[in-house]
Each structure stands twice: as structure tokens, then as C-alpha cells.
Amino acid sequence: MSLELTAPAPEEPSVADDGTWLECIACGAQFAPFEDVRYTCDDCDGLLEVRYASPPTWDDFEGRGVWRYNAALPFEEGVSLPEGATPLHEVPRLEADVGVETLRVKHEGMNPTGSFKDRGMTVGVRVAKELGVGRLACASTGNTSAALAAYGARGGMETLVLLPAGKVAAGKIAQASLHDARILEVDGNFDSCLDIVQDLAARGEAYLLNSLNPFRLEGQKTIGLEILEEFHEDYGSYPDRIVLPVGNAGNTSALYKAFRELVQSGALDVDDVPKLTGVQAEGAAPMVEAIENGWDETRRWDEVETRATAIRIGNPVNAPKALPGIRETNGTAVAVSDEEITEAQRDLAGEGVGVEPASAASVAGLRKLRAEGVVDADEQVVCLTTGHLLKDPDAAFEAGDDPEPVPNDTEAVLEHLAE
């Protein structure tokens, strides 16, 4: 089934529950949303999306945070901490340095557990309760585990997380541990962890809450709704481009879905849809490879390495949703070096915006595309930063300035400062 941006709103099938159902993006098969646990299509194993008979308009939204947008979600409310309503920072020095008309930074690190993953979990854990499952599980490079552990704890549910041994920032493991998740360190990379979690889910041992789960992406699409609303309030227009880090490509898929539903309802003109622009680290860039080569699918990278641990992923499961999102919004994808990521992390910190390395990839990618002439000087751009500085304190310390030892004496301190 086509994912064209201009496709009309779907007709409600008999399997729908209060105007909501699941639909396969590959073959179009439709399923009831909450009768059975289901992650992919029964018929062809394709990815599923949540569909709505009546996509919302701006007038349907009220309140604050993720659940302001409940008219675009499967429920009126979820298991909430609460989440969303993150800042859209002005960064004037960085804006001038990059050389675009407008640059704003959407800082998802200001969610309750410090990353955008909270938006997906507030919906996903609510669905788990609706389905009556007992154990929640995920594979993670860190942020997913922290969010799942917190929201599972909030919902009073058992949580299991699988992490690649030695590859997850300490701040993220600490979160999952404190929220009482059971943490299994796997001798393999993230994609190996996800293979195991999918197998556990298939055997009915746990409810999978990675972004393969279509309900996770419903919460994440509220990032796009917030960006459009706040940007329009400030400028009377929508951004030309949204630049975002890409790991499993869930946010790219989710934002594209948000924009399609707004176009379907008539709330957003197709010409106002921002160009979705993905950024990956050079050591983990299968999406960029697919875009540059015009492929319809990504090819798995078995060996991936980057200091941006949150996007150290070689097999993005949401690529079938994200690749059309980039192409049909006239966006692109670019790979950046770890050195470019660190420079962007420092530049954001210089504006008072503290992010983990993967988050800074969006700014590094924008800078590279601007230098190459792909992004024009008159563009209005939003960069998405996905995780807080303290998610990876070791990386922050390495990127920052070293402490300067001084004697225990005021005059000596003054002399040191004068030097």
C-alpha cells in the first residue's frame, strides 16, 4: 500500500475500534488494534501503522504535552509522568555560524527521563495495559531502556531490557537500574539484542516496546505536532526543514506520519510540509547509504561504531516507513564524523543547550549540508536533539574543558585567572 503524502484519509474498516485500526504498509491488510498482541502483519510480516478514520485538525487539540494531542492518538490519556511540551530553543550565534535564516532547536532531552523516548512509552505502556500483558521488554542503546523502565514502574509492570555489553552510556544504565528494570547485557550489538527481544515477543514471553511496535511511534509523532504549532506561533509559517538524528528511524517515520495525517484532515497544506532530513554517524549509516544509492531498502551493517551511542544501529527497523518520508518530503540524509558531532555538541553547549552526542548529529548534519549547498541560506530550519547532556556524562566530560587545579588561596586563584 502506498505511503504517498497526498493520499486521502482512509475509510474505516469493520475491524476498527472507535475509529482506530492497524494496517500493513506493505500489503494493506487491516487488523483490530487491541484484540491481540501484534507487531507486524500476519499475512506478509510487513510493518504496521495505526490508522484513524478522522485525522485531527489543529482545533481538536487542547491541554499541554503529549496528551494535548489525544485526538491524534488511540486513547484519551496514557501512563504519564507527564511528557512533551519540550522547548524550541533560539540559538542566534549558532544560527549565524551555520548561515540559515532561522535555526531553532527542539530539545527532547527535557522530557522526564531525558529523551524523546518518553513520548512513545506513554502511549505504548497504555496499550500494554489495554492488552493485559504482564512483562514489558525492549532492546536498547540506552534511552529506550531508561524510558521503558520509568513508565513500566509508573504502570506497575515488570520490565526487561537487553543492552549490548559495554556499549551503553553509564547514565542510561543507571536510570534503568534505579527504576527496577531487569537488565541483561548481551554479548553483541544493538541489532543482536533486538533479534532476541523479537524472539521473546514472538514466544509470548514479553510485550515488545521498541519502535517496531506501531503504537510507540504514535507518541513520537507529537514531536512534529509541537514543532509545527510553536514555530507557526512564532513566525506565522512552518519550518522549511526538520533535521534529525537517525538510529532506528522511528522519529523520521513518526514525523512523516504526523504530517500526512494533518494533510489528510486539511490542517496542513502539502506545500507546507517540512523536508525531513536524516543524519547518521559515518560508522553507522545504512539509511544514508540507501538514500545516496536510491535503494528501496537498507542493507544491514553488522559492524557499527560511533561515540554517538544512541544511534549506533546497523539495521534500522523503521526504514520502510522512513525512506518514503525523506523522499516524499524532498528531504535527504547525510553522514557526519564523530569529530563533527563533538564540535556540534560543543556549539550547542555554547548556547546553553546540553545534549548527548547523538543529539548533536542533527546540527552537525545541517552544518555539512549548508556547506555543500544542499541547504540554502534563506531556509528556516528546526534541528531535533533527542537526549539530554547527562545521558552520557563521560562523553560530555571528554568534549568539555578540563578542570584547572589551583592552590587553596584567593590570591593564587586571582593570579591563575590573570594568566
Image (spheres, rainbow, N blue to C red):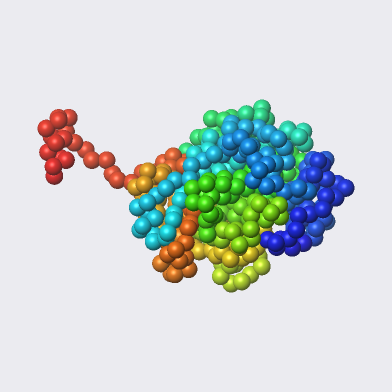
Q: Residue furthest front?
A: 236
Out of 307 and 52, give the one closest to the viewer. Answer: 52
Residue in view at x 73 percent, y 60 percent:
7
Q: Would you place residue 277 above or below residue 209 in this image? A: below
Q: Is residue 369 visible?
A: no
* Point 49% across, 51% down: residue: 235
Q: Is residue 257 left or right of residue 358?
A: right
Query: Looking at this rendering, what residue extends furthest in the right direction?
Result: 14
**Quarter the C terminus occupies:** top left
Query: Would you say 322 lies left or right of 52 here?
Result: left
**Closest to the observer, 39 or 88:** 88
Could you tell me residue 265's position as x and y percent? Answer: 71, 52
Across and down, in percent, residue 230 comes to 53, 46
Is 292 above or below relative to 56? below
**Where is residue 112 drawn, in percent x and y?**
53, 35
Image quadrant of residue 37? top right
Task: Estimate the x, y position of residue 404 in percent, counting from the top left.
Answer: 23, 40
- Asked whether 32 or 307 is in front, the reply is 32
Residue drawn where x is 34% and y is 47% of the image: 350
Q: Quadrant of the N terminus?
A: bottom right
